[in-house]
């Protein structure tokens, strides 16, 4: 395998999945894997299609050095199941929606994002949208952990090639 593609999925693609998208892009760049790893994000719903990430997500990510400003929300498309090597849901409800939409030959690509975390005890990334500022910080902590584990996984996949 000489390229690897990951899609992060949440509900509206304005908080959790763009946060994961931005974090992993930076980790990929720092690991000098640009061109070998494709990162994308989408939502199960079309509520915010075309919109930038939530201002709170942008602000908290920026404080940690992640730039989400170029990302725009979109809904998961049929082609995503064919195009990506991993499709990572933020919680079980997203995973269930993806499982219903996914062609049988691609179901092995569906997983929860936090399966790659090394330190998080949680299995799902909670939605910070209706909560306070601390929710966005907690989401960043969880997703940073998962993305570090995911990067190691991808490096292993790429080295097998």
Image (tube, rainbow, N blue to C red):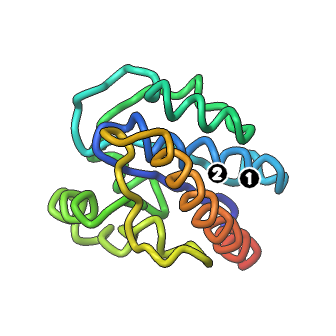
Q: Residue at x 44, y 46 (%)?
A: 16
Q: Position of residue 89 (x, y in %)?
A: 37, 60
What residue sits right under mark 2 in the picture?
24
Name the image quarter holding residue 161: bottom right
Q: How many marks?
A: 2
Residue 102 seen from this side? no
Q: Position of residue 54 (x, y in %)?
A: 44, 28
Q: Residue at x 45, y 48 (%)?
A: 135
Give left or right: position of 104 versus 144: left
Q: Decide: is 158 above or below 47.
A: below
Query: Separation of disc 2 and disc 1 at Cα?
Result: 5 Å
What residue sits right under mark 1 in the picture?
27
Q: Decide: is 118 above or below 106.
A: below
Q: Position of residue 66 (x, y in %)?
A: 69, 38
Q: Residue at x 38, y 50 (%)?
A: 9
Question: Where, quadrant-wise, is the N terminus in this rendering?
Answer: bottom right
Residues marked 2 and 1 touching at CB (< 8 Å): yes
**Camera-side residue of 30 and 118:** 118
* Secondary structure category for the residue under label 2: helix
* Secondary structure category for the residue under label 1: helix
């Amino acid at each position: 395998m000489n390229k690897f593609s990951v899609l992060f999925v949440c509900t509206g693609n304005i908080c959790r999945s763009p946060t994961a998208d931005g974090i992993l892009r930076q980790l990929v760049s720092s690991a000098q894997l640009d061109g070998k790893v494709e990162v994308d994000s989408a939502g199960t719903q079309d509520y915010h299609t075309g919109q930038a990430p939530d201002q709170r997500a942008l602000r908290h990510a920026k404080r940690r050095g992640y730039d989400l400003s170029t990302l725009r929300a979109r809904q998961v498309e049929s082609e995503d199941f064919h195009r990506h090597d991993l499709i990572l849901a933020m919680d079980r409800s997203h995973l269930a929606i993806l499982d219903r939409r996914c062609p049988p030959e691609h179901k092995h690509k569906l997983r929860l994002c936090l399966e790659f975390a090394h330190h998080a005890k949680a299995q799902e990334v909670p939605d910070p949208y209706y909560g306070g500022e601390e929710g966005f910080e907690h989401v960043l902590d969880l997703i940073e952990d998962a993305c570090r584990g995911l990067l190691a996984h991808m490096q292993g996949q790429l080295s097998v090639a």
